[in-house]
């Protein structure tokens, strides 16, 4: 894998993890656990978007 592929690969892995957490949140029966998983999913998804922006050469990722 070349150095330029690593940020994109990391972003993809983060999106996959965020999706897994979102699915776990949907099936969680405990409201507190559901909320925790949803928050973690959103956090990882936001970070993956920043990582994607960096991989694309955008030095000013959106917040």
Image (cartoon, rainbow, N blue to C red):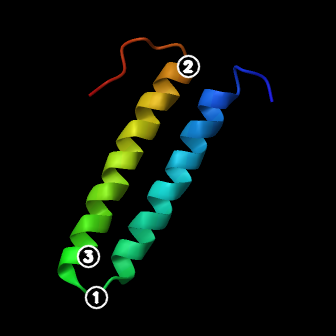
Give me the disc on residue 33. 3
Query: Residue 45, relative to residue 11: is it above or below?
Result: below
- Asked if the residue under mark 1 is in contact with the one under mark 3, i.e. CB atoms within 8 Å, the reply is yes
Quadrant hosting residue 4: top right
Q: Give the side of residue 41 with respect to residue 18, left or right.
A: left
Left or right relative to 2: residue 23: left
Q: Vertically, is 40 above or below 10?
A: below
For marks 1 and 2, give the CA distance. Answer: 39 Å
Specify few, some or many for label 2: CA neighbours under 10 Å numbering under 14, 14-19, or 20 or more: few
Dot 3 or dot 2, earlier in sequence: 3
Q: Residue at x 53, y 13 (%)?
A: 57
Q: Residue at x 70, y 27 (%)?
A: 5
Measure how far apart labels 3 and 1 are at the Cα level: 8 Å
According to the picture, the residue beneath numbered tag 2 turns out to be 56
Counting residues from the start of the chain, the first of labels 1 and 2 encountered is 1
Is disc 3 placed on a helix, strand or loop? helix
Q: State the residue position of label 1.
A: 29
Q: In this view, does 28 lie above or below 37?
A: below
Q: Nearer the viewer, mark 1 or mark 2?
A: 1
Q: Where is residue 7 in the image (x, y as percent from the top left)?
A: 60, 28
Which residue in the rendered view is the most extreme toward the left? 32
In the rendered structure, the answer to whether residue 26 lies left or right of residue 13 reads left
Question: Percent position (x, y) of residue 41?
Answer: 36, 57
Q: Distance between the residues labelled 3 and 2?
A: 34 Å
**Element at label 2:** loop
Rendered location of residue 54, percent (x, y): 49, 20
């Amino acid at each position: 894998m070349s150095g330029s592929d690593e940020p994109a690969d990391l972003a993809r892995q983060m999106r996959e993890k965020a999706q897994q957490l979102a699915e776990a949140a949907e099936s969680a029966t405990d409201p507190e656990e559901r909320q925790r998983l949803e928050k973690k999913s959103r956090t990882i998804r936001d970070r993956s978007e920043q990582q994607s922006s960096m991989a694309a050469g955008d030095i000013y990722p959106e917040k």
